[in-house]
Image: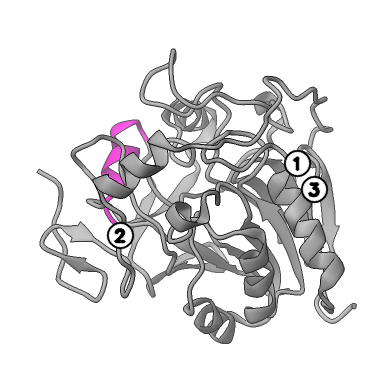
């Protein structure tokens, strides 16, 4: 039996939910799947692995390496954090079917430095990839932070230091605090366990400025509260893909224009786009999210950059107040 939790504004009768958001049902799912107009993707997108990241980045210097989809390496203050690690060829319960990678990971798995912390946003296969996680267990037992209900999966595959949090809760790791924050999404790994576990974003509290990983999320008014609580946000990792058709995907996947609104609302000094260009999960084509974001940025006047990094590229994020 799945664990139960005290009732809250986002949990009742054994399931989690998004406050104030109507969830699509089977009728809407059928409407989408029978009327799909998927954008174009190349079967395989040529790429070359990026250089091996540094073993450690000390002090207040902050390096971010975009590996692909929602997998990002964050290095600062002597710590290495990895978000939603996915290195598998498919994101599926089976190895022979399901969404397949169109682009290789930007960093080879064997080139990853020692990982201190894994940040898991939710249990979907493109974010909670058991084959990759099992390989990380064998490499060095990183600490894992996850939303409610996900810990038992992680412990089952061998992780020992697992911290499970609800929205609004925080926990220490060495000299930093990790904060579980609200996201607008859903959870499921089978047809029978929908929303039995929670979804979330994460804020890592560093001395030289916070890092916000939004996870997988639709757009909502709660982002302003995240900005108010955690400013200054030195770096934000914001999803821009899997948003078409918007009538169906909108509640759980924000579009590039919304991502730019979030960038502004939270006061991020630098944002980096994630969740695009690797797996075809909705009807937007391979380049649509990046193209749409480029149009939004050309039309907007923003004080701080919103970056699209090639897979495997490491970028040094400027210190707070340097723009």
User: Which mark identifies residue 206?
Assistant: none
Q: Which residue carries the number 1 mark?
A: 55
Q: Which residue carries the number 2 mark?
A: 23
Q: Is residue 247 visible?
A: yes
- Label 2 secondary element: loop
Q: Which residue carries the number 3 mark?
A: 309
Q: Nearer the viewer, residue 35 or 88?
A: 35
Measured as percent of width and height from the top left, residue 220 is found at 48, 73
At a point 32% along the width and 49% down the height, the residue shown is: 28
At a point 39% along the width and 34% down the height, the residue shown is: 34
Whether tag 2 and tag 1 are in contact, CB under 8 A, the answer is: no
Q: Is residue 70 left or right of residue 312?
A: left
- Label 1 secondary element: loop
Whether tag 2 and tag 3 are in contact, CB under 8 A, the answer is: no
* Residue located farthest toward the bottom when viewing the structure as drawn: 228
Q: Nearer the viewer, residue 77 or 51?
A: 51
- The residue mark sitting in front, 3 or 1, is 3
Measured as percent of width and height from the top left, residue 145 is found at 43, 54
Which of pointers 2 and 3 lies earlier in the amino acid sequence? 2
Which of pointers 2 and 1 lies earlier in the amino acid sequence? 2
Q: In the rendered view, would you say 104 is above or below 31? A: above
Q: CA distance from mark 2 to mark 3?
A: 32 Å
At a point 67% along the width and 66% down the height, the residue shown is: 257
At a point 50% along the width and 43% down the height, the residue shown is: 142
Does the magenta run of residues contain 73? no
Q: Nearer the viewer, residue 244 or 75?
A: 244
- By what rule are the colours in the image chosen? one colour
Quarter of the image with the C terminus is bottom right
- Label 3 secondary element: loop
Measured as percent of width and height from the top left, residue 93 is found at 36, 25
Residue range highlighted in magenta? 148-158
């Amino acid at each position: 039996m799945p664990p139960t939790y005290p009732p809250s504004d986002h949990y009742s009768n054994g399931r989690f939910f998004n406050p104030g958001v109507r969830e699509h049902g089977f009728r809407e799912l059928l409407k989408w799947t029978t009327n799909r107009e998927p954008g174009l993707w190349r079967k395989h997108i040529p790429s070359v692995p990026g250089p091996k990241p540094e073993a450690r980045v000390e002090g207040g210097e902050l390096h971010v390496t975009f590996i692909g989809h929602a997998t990002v390496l964050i290095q600062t203050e002597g710590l290495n954090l990895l978000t939603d690690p996915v290195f598998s060829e498919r994101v599926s319960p089976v190895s022979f079917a399901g969404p397949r990678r169109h682009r290789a990971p930007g960093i080879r798995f064997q080139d990853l430095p020692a990982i201190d912390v894994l940040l898991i946003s939710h249990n979907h296969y493109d974010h909670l990839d058991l084959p990759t996680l099992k390989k990380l267990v064998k490499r060095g037992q990183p600490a894992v932070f996850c939303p409610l209900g996900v810990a038992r999966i992680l412990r089952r595959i061998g992780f020992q230091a697992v911290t499970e949090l609800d929205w609004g809760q925080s926990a220490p790791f060495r000299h930093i605090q990790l904060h579980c924050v609200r996201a607008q999404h859903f959870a499921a790994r089978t047809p029978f366990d929908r929303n039995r576990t929670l979804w979330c974003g994460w804020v890592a509290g560093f001395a030289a400025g916070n890092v916000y990983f939004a996870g997988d999320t639709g757009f909502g008014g709660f982002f302003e509260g995240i900005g108010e609580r955690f400013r200054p946000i030195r770096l934000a990792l914001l999803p821009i893909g899997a948003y078409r058709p918007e009538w169906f995907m909108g509640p759980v996947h924000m579009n590039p224009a919304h991502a730019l609104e979030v960038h502004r609302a939270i006061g991020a000094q630098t944002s980096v786009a994630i969740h695009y260009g690797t797996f075809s999960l909705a009807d937007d084509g391979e380049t649509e999210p990046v193209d749409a974001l480029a149009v939004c940025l050309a039309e907007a006047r923003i004080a701080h950059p919103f970056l699209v990094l090639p897979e495997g590229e490491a970028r040094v994020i400027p210190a707070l107040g340097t723009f």
